[in-house]
Image: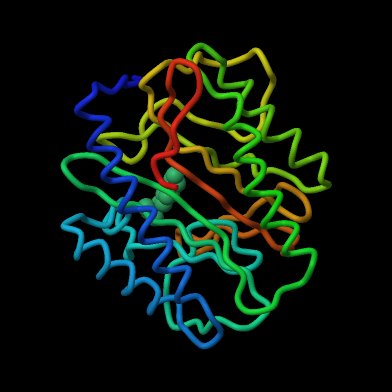
């Protein structure tokens, strides 16, 4: 069931979204060679708690941390641990904050020190693909219009979009209907309506779109072990455009 948010719910989603955005800014300041992903997780946990919020991911289906930290060929859902960040890596950090009964969800991919031009392009195209989709959003468009805009932008740049994982509606639950694929056909799918809130999250691979699910039960990697980037925002659909709640 797709939920349409009332004004007071939207206010709460703005609050959850602002905290989620702020956590990512704090993480951004701390991503550098030598820090462990567990240290980043603790920084996120402490920040979220200091806002009076709760980390959306912690305990979700048994997930053991507040952030997902996915390095290089890891696509999403990397579990924080003792791994030390090294110059030249790219790291995708995904985080959610829950407050007053509503969730925010967002992700960014960061450079660890100096990175290759190829990786810079991967991060840039991934972010831009979100905005290619975002700019067509308004009441009444179809999901496939959004999906197609993201996919065609990514593929024109020579990269591929992950198919096995998609974005989602968000609100009282972190994952609500509808599914928000990053691939699809214009003119198809459900209609997006004013006051729906969705998390749009392109996962973009430098090589092929195929992924593997690892034996830790969470980490998703590219099949060809080429790098992958992730960019996500929680978005409110309005009558003639949309509002990003996590930026
Ligand atoms: N943020 C992820 C998403 O966008 C969910 C992470 S799964 C969790 O759907 F278990 F880590 F919460
Ligand atoms: Co999400």
Front residue (pair 146, 183): 146
Q: Residue at x 55, y 24 (%)?
A: 137
Q: Residue furthest front?
A: 240
Going by the image, does 138 lie left or right of 125? left
Instruction: Give the quarter the ligand 2 occupies.
Output: top left
Compared to residue 139, the image places residue 97 above or below, namely below
Front residue (pair 83, 122): 122
Percent x, y of residue 159: 78, 48
Looking at the figure, which quarter contains the N terminus? top left
Q: Quadrant of residue 22?
A: bottom left
Count of numbered circles in the view: 0
Q: Residue at x 19, y 65 (%)?
A: 50
Going by the image, does 29 lie left or right of 16? right
Percent x, y of residue 224: 75, 60
Percent x, y of residue 179: 48, 29
Compared to residue 149, the image places residue 66 above or below, namely below
Going by the image, does 239 lie left or right of 195? right
Percent x, y of residue 41: 36, 71
Q: Residue at x 58, y 53 (%)?
A: 230
Q: Residue at x 70, y 63 (%)?
A: 227
Q: Residue furthest bottom?
A: 34
């Amino acid at each position: 069931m797709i939920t349409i948010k009332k004004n007071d719910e939207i206010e709460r989603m703005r609050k959850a979204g602002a905290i989620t955005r702020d956590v990512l800014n704090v993480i951004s300041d701390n991503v550098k060679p030598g820090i462990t992903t567990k240290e980043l997780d603790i920084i996120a946990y402490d920040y979220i708690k200091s806002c009076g919020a709760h980390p959306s991911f912690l305990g979700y289906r048994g997930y053991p941390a507040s952030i997902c930290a996915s390095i290089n060929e890891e696509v999403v859902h990397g579990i924080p641990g003792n791994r030390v960040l090294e110059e030249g890596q790219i790291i995708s950090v995904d985080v959610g904050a829950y407050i007053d009964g509503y969730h925010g969800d967002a992700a960014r991919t960061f450079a660890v020190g100096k990175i290759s031009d190829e990786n810079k392009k991967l991060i840039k195209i991934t972010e831009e693909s979100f905005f290619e989709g975002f700019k067509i959003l308004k009441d009444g468009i179809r999901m496939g219009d959004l999906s197609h805009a993201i996919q065609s932008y990514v593929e024109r740049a020579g990269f591929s979009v992950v198919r096995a994982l998609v974005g989602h509606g968000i609100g009282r639950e972190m994952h609500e209907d509808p599914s928000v694929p990053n691939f699809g056909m214009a003119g198809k799918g459900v209609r997006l309506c004013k006051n729906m809130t969705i998390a749009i999250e392109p996962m973009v691979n430098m090589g092929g779109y195929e992924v593997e699910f690892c034996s830790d039960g969470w980490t998703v990697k590219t099949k060809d072990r080429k790098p992958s980037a992730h960019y996500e925002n929680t978005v409110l659909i309005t009558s003639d455009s949309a509002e990003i709640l996590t930026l």
